Image (cartoon, rainbow, N blue to C red):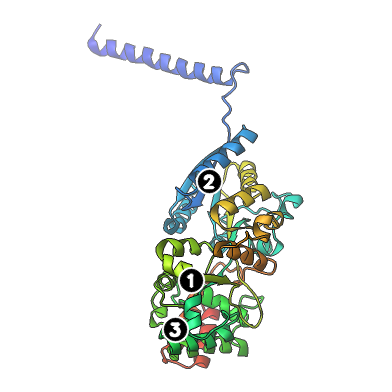
């Protein structure tokens, strides 16, 4: 037999053996006596910069959940704060998104408008929904549909330097913007320093945008069109323009973000820091002398008396292949008991009513530290606090338009009326 014929014969035998092996594998796998191995659903959970401070907390929480739900496994991935938006955008676009994601409503709403998240109204039982604060639940809806579960909250308070205010002849910290303007004049005249730093950087804090609502303006109407070209809107623009042009705000407010507000307060250069109670820890660490003369007061607001709250939520991407397990885990994280424990660990506020009514938030220790007082003030504010900015998928674009026009008016490049008119026109024509 020639070598060529021998190879041909061997190849036929190998081909038959391979085919037989494939058939045998198929028969065995389909046989009633050999069912495929069942795999527990795995929930991939992304948070924003909670490691390493809360590593033990979440490892314990996940272990408890898995013990109570042995058929579900959880994989926790912590993403740096600055990377979350780009990472989740990439993952959603590629169809590789995790199953539960920790975001804020502003950014979550942007993707909710593109149907990135699974609607939760039919997935969450009515009794579970009723546990959350109604106004906070509303912040997680868009066009009448729920896209996220509320998690933890932060609400701004006024942290103030008692020594600076005393030197300026100010007996009480300002409660509203009208009082803030007067305090700003006194602080500048008596001490040469500033009362506060409020950023007008379009990509940074939305504090100024929120102030328009607190002063009585409406940002958009029911059709999404600009609604701030009104006497109230122009008065709010005029307020900030007057403060800046009178030299009562640092020039850096046009170029520096909220981080600069913290730095100036810790350096003793400003009298008031508008921020969350958690920043008291930073002041104690970075500026002990300033911390010793710091006290706290309720959030500075406008004539409406409205106070703002920031919400962190949990969303479930529409692409998840374990929707029931994902929602079950999200509800577990945000149930009253776990919200209370996390709020204590992280010095934040819970979004469930029973947790917020716990004595930890309603009764300060005696004697009360600034942090204790801040916690009780924040909890009291939650009785009426709300997410002031409307649920718009392009809310950041509105902020940029308003801040750009405000800056132009502050620099004297255009009148307040022109700035407001052009801001409204730019929003409607976007």
Crowding at mark 2 (Cα within 10 Å: few <14, some 14-19, many 20+): many
Is there a contact, CB below 8 Å, between mark 1 and mark 3?
no
Q: Which residue is mark 2?
A: 45
State the separation of the CA atoms marked 2 and 3.
Answer: 42 Å
Q: Which residue is mark 1?
A: 293
Task: Give the left or right position of residue 242, taking residue 217 as reference.
Answer: left
- Residue 134 point in image, percent of width and height: 71, 62
Q: Is residue 75 above or below residue 91?
A: above
Q: Is residue 350 above or below residue 415?
A: above
In the rendered structure, find residue 249 and report the number of the disc placed on it. Answer: 3
Q: Secondary structure at mark 2?
A: strand
- Residue 295 point in image, percent of width and height: 54, 70
State the separation of the CA atoms marked 2 and 1.
Answer: 41 Å
Q: Secondary structure at mark 1?
A: loop
State the separation of the CA atoms marked 1 and 3.
Answer: 22 Å
Front one among 281 and 352: 281
Q: Who's the residue at 42% across and 14% down the image?
A: 17
Front one among 218 and 352: 352
Q: Is residue 262 above or below residue 409?
A: above
- Residue 428 point in image, percent of width and height: 55, 80
Q: In the rendered image, is residue 278 in sight?
A: yes
Nearer to us: label 2 or label 3: 3
Crowding at mark 3 (Cα within 10 Å: few <14, some 14-19, many 20+): many
Q: Who's the residue at 55% across and 62% down the image?
A: 371
Q: Earlier in the sequence, mark 2 or mark 3?
A: 2
Q: Secondary structure at mark 3?
A: loop
Single out the residue that lies furthest toward the right.
127
Front one among 234 and 17: 234
């Amino acid at each position: 037999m020639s070598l060529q014929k021998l190879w041909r014969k061997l190849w036929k035998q190998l081909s038959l053996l391979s085919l037989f092996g494939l058939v045998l594998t198929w028969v065995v796998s389909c046989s009633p006596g050999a069912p495929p191995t069942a795999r527990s659903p795995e929930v991939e959970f992304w948070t924003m910069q909670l490691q390493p401070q809360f590593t033990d907390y979440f490892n314990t929480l996940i272990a408890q959940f898995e013990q109570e739900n042995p058929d579900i496994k959880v994989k926790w991935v912590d993403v740096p704060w600055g990377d979350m938006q780009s990472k989740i955008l990439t993952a959603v676009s590629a169809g590789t998104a995790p199953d539960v994601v920790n975001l804020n409503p502003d950014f979550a709403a942007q993707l909710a408008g593109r149907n990135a998240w699974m609607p939760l109204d039919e997935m969450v039982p009515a009794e579970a929904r009723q546990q959350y604060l109604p106004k906070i639940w509303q912040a997680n809806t868009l066009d009448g549909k729920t896209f996220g579960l509320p998690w933890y909250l932060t609400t701004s308070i006024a942290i103030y330097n008692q020594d600076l205010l005393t030197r300026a002849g100010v007996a009480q910290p300002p409660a509203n913007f009208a009082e803030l303007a007067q305090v700003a004049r006194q602080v500048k005249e008596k001490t040469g320093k500033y009362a506060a730093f409020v950023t007008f950087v379009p990509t940074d804090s939305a504090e100024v945008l929120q102030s328009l609502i607190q002063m009585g303006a409406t940002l958009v109407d029911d059709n999404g069109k600009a609604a701030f070209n009104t006497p109230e809107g122009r008065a709010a623009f005029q307020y900030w323009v007057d403060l800046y042009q009178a030299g009562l705000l640092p020039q850096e407010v046009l170029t520096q973000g909220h981080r600069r507000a913290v730095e100036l307060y810790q350096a003793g250069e400003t009298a008031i820091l508008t921020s969350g109670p958690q920043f008291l820890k930073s002041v104690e660490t970075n500026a002990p002398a300033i911390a010793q003369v710091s006290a706290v007061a309720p959030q500075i607001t406008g004539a409406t008396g409205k106070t703002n709250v920031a919400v962190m939520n949990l969303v479930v991407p529409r692409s998840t292949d374990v929707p029931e397990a994902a929602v079950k885990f999200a509800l577990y994280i945000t149930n009253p008991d776990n919200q209370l424990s996390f709020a204590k660990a992280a010095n934040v506020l819970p979004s469930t009513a029973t947790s917020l009514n716990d004595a930890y938030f309603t009764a300060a220790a005696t004697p009360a530290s600034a942090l204790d007082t801040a916690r009780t003030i924040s909890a009291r504010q939650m009785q009426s606090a709300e997410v002031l900015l409307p649920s718009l998928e392009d809310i950041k674009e509105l902020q940029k338009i308003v801040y750009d026009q405000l800056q132009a008016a502050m620099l004297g490049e255009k009148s307040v009326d022109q700035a407001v008119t052009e801001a409204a026109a730019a929003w409607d024509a976007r």
